[in-house]
Image (tube, helix red, strand yellow):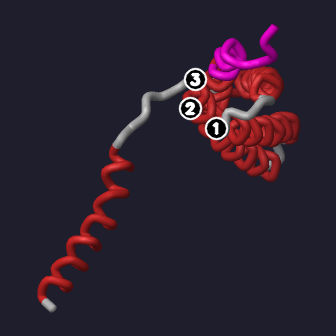
């Protein structure tokens, strides 16, 4: 009886510890991982900035309508890019091309207000990082001739 109990304890310990040993193994970052992370970070910054612009509009600053919409569209591009790139999808090049362009436009729009608005500066900075990561990703993907 004691032997069976001991065997069960050992088995349970192995089952509980085994996944931890696999989780501890870190794989090196790939261009896909770097790009997906940049896209996720940018998506969050753009969503935050969009909400910020909506608050500014509620205060009567109507000039933020364009940046709010730009941030919303950029966040959607970044979210799609992060999803496709993280699974190393065959359309990674296509979505990265679109995402890089969206990030360029959004970064340009937010940069106009960035000198006096920290939230918009952060959004512009994240857009620049994401644009760069997407352009780098395009060098690793795409149709091979």
Earlier in the chain: of badge 2 and badge 1, it is 2
Which element is circle 3 on? helix
Which numbered marker is on residue 86? 1
Residue wearing tag 3 = 31
Judging depth in this view, the residue of 96 and 56 nearest the camera is: 96
The answer to whether 68 is drawn above or below residue 110 in the figure is below
Residue 117 visible (yes or no): no
Q: Quadrant of the N terminus?
A: bottom left
Which element is circle 1 on? helix
Report which quarter residue 72 is drawn in. top right
Residue depicted at x 56% and y 28%: 34
What's the distance in space between the residues labelled 2 and 1, CA to CA?
6 Å
Residue 138 visible (yes or no): yes
Residue depicted at x 66% and y 16%: 140
Residue wearing tag 2 = 33
Residue 62 belongs to the span the image colors magenta: no
Stretch of the chain drawn in magenta: 133-145
Q: Badge 3: how crowded within 10 Å, few (<14), some, or many (20+)?
A: many
Q: Quadrant of the C terminus?
A: top right
Residue depicted at x 68% and y 38%: 82
Residue 66: x, y in percent?
87, 35
Which element is circle 2 on? helix
**Residue contact between numbered discs 2 and 3, judged by CB atoms under 8 Å:** yes
């Amino acid at each position: 009886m004691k032997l069976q109990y001991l065997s069960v304890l050992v088995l349970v310990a192995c089952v509980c510890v085994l996944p931890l040993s696999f989780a501890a193994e870190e794989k090196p970052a790939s261009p896909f991982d770097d790009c997906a992370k940049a896209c996720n970070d940018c998506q969050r910054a753009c969503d935050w900035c969009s909400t910020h612009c909506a608050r500014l509009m509620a205060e009567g600053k109507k000039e933020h309508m364009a940046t709010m919409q730009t941030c919303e569209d950029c966040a959607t591009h970044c979210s799609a890019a992060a999803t496709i790139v993280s699974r190393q999808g065959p359309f990674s090049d296509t979505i990265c091309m679109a995402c890089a362009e969206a990030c360029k436009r959004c970064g340009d729009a937010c940069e106009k207000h960035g000198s006096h608005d920290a939230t918009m500066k952060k959004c512009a900075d994240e857009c620049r990082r994401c644009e760069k990561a997407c352009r780098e990703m395009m060098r690793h993907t795409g149709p091979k001739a």
